């Protein structure tokens, strides 16, 4: 069984015609409701600057992340950063630095 992973998605929307963006965005919002295909949103999209924002998603299959990125590729660039539980990191540190 695959462990569920969380990703911080840092995204930037391309400067395109607002009507076109709205059309694509509306379709993408509807598509993303399919958690089986696109993963689960943990933190919905938040802007931090003009046309730039973040979201957090939970996935259990890398294909879900690929689907999510492909869905908005026409108007958004996404950088996916894996989030690692601190307890997992601590355990790994202990294992690698035993004396």
Image: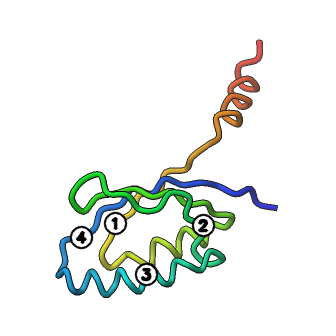
Q: Position of residue 8 (x, y in %)?
A: 49, 53
State the SS at label 1.
Answer: strand
Whichever of labels 3 and 4 marks the residue nearer the N terminus, that label is 4
Q: Which residue is mark 2?
A: 40
Residue 24 picture location, percent across and down = 34, 84
Q: Earlier in the sequence, mark 2 or mark 4?
A: 4
- Residue under circle 4? 14
From the viewer's perspective, is the residue at label 2 or at label 4 nearer?
Answer: 2
- Alpha carbon of mark 1 to alpha carbon of mark 4: how far? 7 Å
Mark 3: which secondary structure? Answer: helix
Labelled pair 2, 1 in contact (Cβ < 8 Å): no
Question: Pointer 3: what residue?
Answer: 28
Q: CA distance from mark 2 to mark 3?
A: 14 Å
User: Do the numbered discs 1 and 3 sit on residues whose CB atoms are within 8 Å?
Assistant: no
Q: Is residue 91 left or right of residue 71?
A: right
Closest to the camera, between mark 1 and mark 3, is: 3
Q: In front of the other: label 2 or label 1? A: 2
Q: Mark 2 or mark 3: name the one nearer the start of the chain.
A: 3
């Amino acid at each position: 069984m695959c462990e569920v992973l969380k990703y911080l998605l840092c995204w930037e929307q391309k400067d395109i015609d607002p009507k076109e963006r709205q059309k694509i965005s509306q379709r993408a919002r509807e598509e993303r409701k399919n958690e089986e295909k696109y993963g689960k949103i943990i933190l919905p999209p938040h802007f931090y600057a003009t046309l730039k924002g973040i979201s957090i998603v939970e996935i259990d299959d890398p294909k879900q992340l690929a689907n999510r990125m492909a869905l908005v590729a026409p108007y958004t660039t996404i950088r996916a950063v894996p989030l690692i539980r601190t307890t997992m990191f601590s355990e790994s540190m202990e294992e690698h630095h035993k004396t």
